[in-house]
Image (cartoon, rainbow, N blue to C red):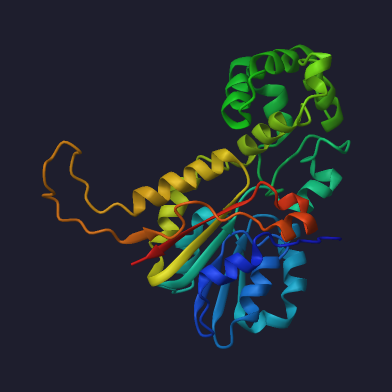
Amino acid sequence: MDFNHVPVLAAEIIENLHIKPDGIYFDGTLGGGGHSSLICSHLSSGRLIATDRDSNAIKAASDRLAPYMDRVTIVKDNFSNAKYVLDNLDIDGIDGAMLDLGVSSHQLDEPERGFSYRFDAPLDMRMDTDAPLSAYEVVNEYSQQDLTRIIFDYGEDKNARKIAKKIVEKRPIRTTLELVEVIKSAFSPQERHEGKHPAKRTFQAIRIEVNNELDMLSGAISRLADKLSKGSRLCIITFHSLEDRIVKTTFNQLSQGCTCPKDFPVCVCGNEPKFRVVTRKPILPSEKELAENPRSASSKLRVLERI
């Protein structure tokens, strides 16, 4: 299995985690193990806990992390369950954590997974191949109204209504390229040749729905932040505006101390902030990284610190 993972914003992650050789760290999106291997290379007596819901990722990352297995614990789970994973390992606090959100390069490049609109494959898009809901059910069983909502909300596509109507008219749709052709039919010839691939937003929307990527994100961030020890940091990489908006909003909420209504002239709750936002503006990839890894183009890194 070829699972080449070029970690995005890798130097920036390492710089912001302030890794202690004897610290305990958490990587909630193991993927191909790129970030995890870099974290491990800075550990001596420390420990890394890593989770992923993709069995293929775990197998590939285990191979990549073989030189560091004395300091790594890998758990097949979703990062939203980080608190329970850490509790089960009797870990009360961690010295840093990171999440690299979205679909991995491997998942996009492995045709049979059905994530990409570039390859013909069965409609799947499950990050966890044991999960019951796949893209096939979303495309072929959801109502036109629900499809419109998903494509508009998760894909931010102004043609959501027309795309959903075309999908319902052409069902059953069994493969990715069948779906691509149906989506294209909702666009004018001019629109098909403007900007991004016409199927990009719809594929993103269906993938997010299949994997419940956004509904769990804010709560997952809060629970993971609660596990941070004083002075430690949570680093999160996002790849589209929906993710980034949730991360930014959640970080800002966590960094607020006072919970009094805004019309109160003075604070009466006495609550002190437990976190501070390190990155008021997100960290973006360098020109060098963009040239070497074009898939980093949409990535943004935000950092939260426990105080």
Q: Position of residue 297 (x, y in %)?
A: 70, 48
Residue at 76% from the left image edge and 31% from the top image edge:
196
Identity of the residue drawn at 69% across and 55% down = 54
Res. 46 image quadrant: bottom right
Seen at 48% across and 62% down, the residue is: 234
In the rendered view, tell whether residue 60 sits above or below residue 101. Answer: below
User: Which is nearer the eye, 56 or 214?
Assistant: 214
Which one is in front, 96 or 47?
96
Q: Point out residue 221 in the picture as x, y percentages from the top left corner.
A: 46, 53
- Residue 247 relative to residue 37: left or right: left
User: In the depicted view, which residue is nearer to us: 40 or 63?
Assistant: 40
Compared with 17, 184 (above or below) is above
Quadrant position of the N terminus in the picture: bottom right
What residue is drawn where x is 60% and y is 26%?
Answer: 150
Farthest residue, direction bottom = 45
| Residue 172 seen in the current view | no
Quadrant for the C terminus in the image: bottom left
**Relative image position of residue 94 (x, y in whole percent):** 45, 72
Residue 157 vertical placement versus 70 (above, below)? above
